[in-house]
Image (tube, grey):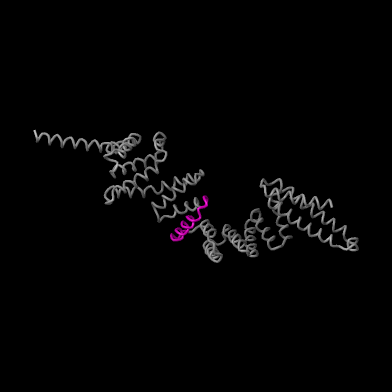
């Protein structure tokens, strides 16, 4: 009787052990037959079962099945796990965690994780393009972890970080890309934007110009850098280069006009704004800035009239007042046009104040 008992006990243990791993085996077989719905059902059981939830094989197989669920084009399978890619990633990470000796399933999971790199890049790009920037950012960070020596994860990470205003990580990604010897015009733009030291900013600019001579983007960036540093004449030269390349580009012409204003060359600024308005009569900045220039000219001329002596006034006062009225009339015209072209509260307030002051002066 004793021998029979031992035999029966051994059989019972074997059957129990088999039943514990049968869910994993069934999941593998269903997956092999591309029955992903049934494979998912079985592997989901295995990773929560008391006897197999700590088995790295169970989690590895979950990662494999969920990877295919994330890649399937069959809607009936895709709908089973909306976050399949993240679930696959978590499952492979769990398999590694449960195999601290770095045995078979640790190594298999490590390989499969690396294979998920393009999936996270593509998924992140899709989310970014549909304005799910935070979700995309998470995918790009994981991509960086999976393949730390490839540039794509950091490039996309830069886009997301910049969009979200995460300058701290943006700087880290930029530094990493520099260490990977990555170069592009947009990347140089980001580096220049991030650099706070004026001298270093100019050094990066020179490096960019050497790498991409004649680049319209970098010519514009050079103008922006010089203008930011108060080097208005240098900025003007860069923007003029841009206008030479793109003579009807309103944005470039606007930058030229603004530099003329900063250099107190208002007549040239007005000529440039006139050129802009011939291309785009509804250009807000051109109308607004012309209004300001003529308004200030009108006030200056009006002050001169008030300082005339009686004899001087009799000789030239009337002609000067006519000139003042013309200046204010021009300012009024452009201010009225600008007012119709903006919804900004501050702009509207400033324009209305200008118009009100013009009306008061003219009535006097």
Q: Provide residue 144's location: percent of width, then percent of height.
A: 42, 52
For the residue pair 93 and 218, the one nearer the viewer reads as 93
For the question of whether residue 283 can be seen, the reply is no
Hey, which quadrant is residue 30 in on the image? top left
261 relative position to 8: left or right = right
x, y percent for residue 161: 49, 52
Picture coordinates of residue 128, whole percent (x, y): 49, 46
What's the magenta region? Answer: 162-182
Name the residue at 66% across, 54% down. Answer: 248
Residue at 75%, 51% in the rendered image? 354
- What secondary structure characterizes most of the magenta part? helix
Q: Residue at x 41, y 50 (%)?
A: 143
What residue occupies the far front of the structure in this picture? 2
Compared to residue 165, the image places residue 222 above or below, namely: below
Is 30 placed left or right of 244 in the picture?
Answer: left
The one nearer the camera, 48 or 333, is: 48
- Asked if residue 191 shows in the view, the reply is yes
Q: Tell me, yes or no, whether the highlighted magenta stretch contains residue 95.
A: no
The quadrant holding residue 18 is top left
The N terminus: image quadrant: top left
Q: Find residue 198 and report its image quarter.
A: bottom right
Q: Could you tell me residue 188's position as x and y percent?
A: 52, 59
In the figure, is residue 315 to the left or right of 241? right
Question: Quick one: 95 or 352, which is closer to the camera?
Answer: 352
Q: Residue at x 57, y 57 (%)?
A: 217
């Amino acid at each position: 009787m004793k021998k029979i008992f031992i035999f029966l006990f051994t059989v019972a243990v074997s059957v129990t052990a088999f039943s514990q791993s049968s869910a994993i085996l069934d999941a593998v077989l269903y997956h092999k037959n591309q029955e992903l719905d049934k494979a998912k059902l079985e592997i989901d059981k295995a990773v929560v079962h008391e006897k197999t939830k700590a088995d790295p094989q169970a989690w590895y197989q979950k990662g494999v099945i969920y990877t295919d669920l994330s890649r399937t084009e069959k809607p009936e399978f895709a709908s089973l796990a909306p976050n399949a890619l993240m679930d696959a990633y978590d499952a492979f990470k769990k398999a590694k965690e449960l195999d601290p000796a770095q045995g078979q399933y640790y190594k298999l999971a490590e390989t499969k994780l690396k294979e998920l790199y393009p999936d996270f890049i593509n998924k992140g790009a899709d989310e970014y393009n549909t304005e799910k920037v935070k979700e995309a950012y998470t995918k790009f960070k994981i991509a960086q972890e999976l393949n730390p020596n490839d540039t794509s994860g950091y490039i996309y990470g830069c886009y997301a970080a910049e969009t979200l205003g995460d300058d701290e990580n943006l700087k880290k990604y930029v530094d990493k890309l520099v260490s990977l010897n990555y170069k592009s015009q947009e990347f140089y733009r980001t580096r220049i934007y991030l650099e706070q030291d004026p001298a270093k900013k100019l050094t990066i600019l020179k490096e960019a110009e050497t790498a991409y001579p004649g680049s319209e983007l970098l010519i514009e960036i050079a103008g922006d850098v010089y203008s930011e540093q108060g080097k208005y004449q240098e900025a003007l030269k860069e923007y003029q280069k841009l206008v030479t390349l793109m003579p009807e580009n309103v944005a470039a012409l606007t930058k030229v006009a603004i530099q003329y204003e900063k250099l107190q060359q208002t007549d040239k600024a007005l000529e440039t704004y006139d050129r802009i308005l011939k291309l785009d009569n509804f250009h807000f900045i051109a109308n607004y800035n012309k209004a300001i220039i003529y308004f200030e000219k009108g006030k200056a001329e009006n002050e001169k009239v008030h300082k005339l002596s009686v004899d001087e006034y009799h000789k030239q006062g009337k002609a000067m007042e006519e000139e003042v009225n013309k200046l204010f009339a021009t300012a009024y015209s452009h201010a009225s046009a600008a007012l119709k072209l903006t919804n900004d509260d501050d702009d509207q307030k400033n324009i209305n104040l200008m118009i009100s002051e013009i009306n008061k002066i003219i009535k006097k």
